[in-house]
Image (cartoon, coloured by chain):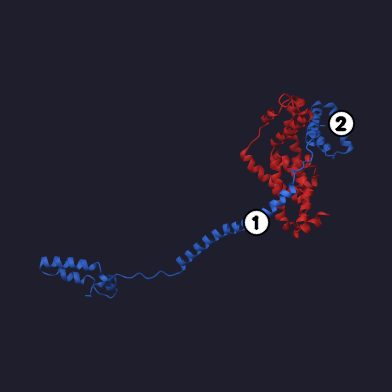
Chain colours: A red, B blue
Amino acid sequence: MEDRKLIELAKDGSQDAFSELVLKYQAKVFSMVLNFTRDRETADDLSQEIFLKAYLALPRFRFGSEFGTWLYRISLNHVRDYLRKAGKRKTVSLEEIGELPTRDESAEMKEKEQVQESRKKLLHQLLEAIPVKYRIVLTLRDIQGLPYDEISRVLRISQGTVDSRLHRARKMLRKKLAPYLSGEGERYAL
Amino acid sequence: MRCNKAETWLLWSSDGRLDAKRRRELDEHLRTCPRCALMEKEYGALRSLLANEGPAEPLPHFLERLKSRFTAEKKSFVLLLWERWCLRAVPVFLGAVLAFGLAVFFLVPPAQDQMAQSGLLFLNGQNPLSETQSILEEGMGEARQMRLIFAAADEADYRGREMP
């Protein structure tokens, strides 16, 4: 069933219709939140809160944009709030990357899994080191694969701004990644 | 070609936004500039790192857990509305009390103060000291002192005092 029909049914009080929307979008929302939180349980909890917010706000949805765009906007605002609160409690430095498991410590882990895990951790550490507004654009484009025009609609900024933020984000990330490419690249299979 | 431009084109290229002509120019530059060639390698590694982040599935029974939260949320939503109403009602109540107080202060005329007996005598054109004056004019000093003492005792309850 199309999103529009499902939304209309959900607005009329059909929980089944909203459940279908949840099933359709849960992986997208969860993946995006996970990119910011790094923790699966936190991401799961935030995703549930996002769907609750969406459910409560659904009567105000006037089909001014696609449902996915609207849901992404709710998700990003929720994640921004979370990061603002979490940022006050915790700051992550790049030095923490040194604490990743080494080959000796994780002898029981398969090599491939270990490398994958290390790469993920490295990426998250690098992402956390760049400002949120750049991280959001980079996540939406390079991880979530959203087109420029949709990112522009989700963030309510021009495509030119999306382009310049993405450009700066990639530059920042490359600079932070460069030492690992020259020195420790092998450890992360880069 | 300048290296800054090459970097921009590299990024456009990764988004598939670089036409064939510019791509050739860029390739030419990359062959001659080791710095930009290294940069291309680094961007390649970055892309590979980002591509590693595939879509993730939420924890099991996501929908079931969400449904149970909906039920709980509906109850707390009513409470939340009530809390919000109360939070708005408190300042409104205080504002109303303040407005009422100000209205009473400015609009209601003050009640007339009750005048003292001596004030009333003044208004009636009489001398309020006439009684004391007659005592002071008496000849005997001792009797005069006694009368002054009794007159002072009477002054405390001037309302009950007989008019001269």
Q: Nearer the viewer, residue B83 or A157?
A: B83
Q: Return the x and y of residue A23 as percentages of the image width and height.
A: 78, 49
Dividing the picture into quadrants, the one containing residue A118 is: top right
Q: On the same chain: label 2 and label 1?
A: yes
Residue at the spot 88% in from the left edge and 39% down from the top edge: B19
Q: Return the x and y of residue A77 as percentages of the image width and height.
A: 69, 47
Mark 2 falls within which chain? B
Residue A156 in view of the camera:
no
Q: Quadrant of the N terminus of chain B?
A: top right
Q: Is residue B78 above or below residue A170?
A: below
* Residue designated by label 1: B75
Dividing the picture into quadrants, the one containing residue A177 is: top right
Q: Nearer the viewer, residue B34 or B90?
A: B90
Residue at the spot 39% in from the left edge and 70% down from the top edge: B111
SS class, disc 1: helix
Q: Nearer the viewer, residue B134 or A71?
A: A71
Q: Return the x and y of residue B59 as percentages of the image width and height.
A: 74, 43
Nearer the N terminus, badge 2 or badge 1? 2
Categorize mark 2 by other alpha carbons within 10 Å: few (<14), some (14-19), many (20+). Answer: some
Q: Nearer the viewer, mark 2 or mark 1?
A: 1
Residue type beneath disc 2:
Asp
Residue B101 in view of the camera:
yes
Horizontal side of residue B131 vs A171, given as left or right: left
Residue at the spot 74% in from the left edge and 37% down from the top edge: A169
Horizontal side of residue A42 vs B83, given as left or right: right
Q: Quadrant of the C terminus of chain B?
A: bottom left
Please state the total of marks drawn on the protein image.
2
Measure how far apart labels 2 and 1 are at the Cα level. 63 Å
* Residue designated by label 2: B27
Q: Is residue B9 above or below residue B98?
A: above
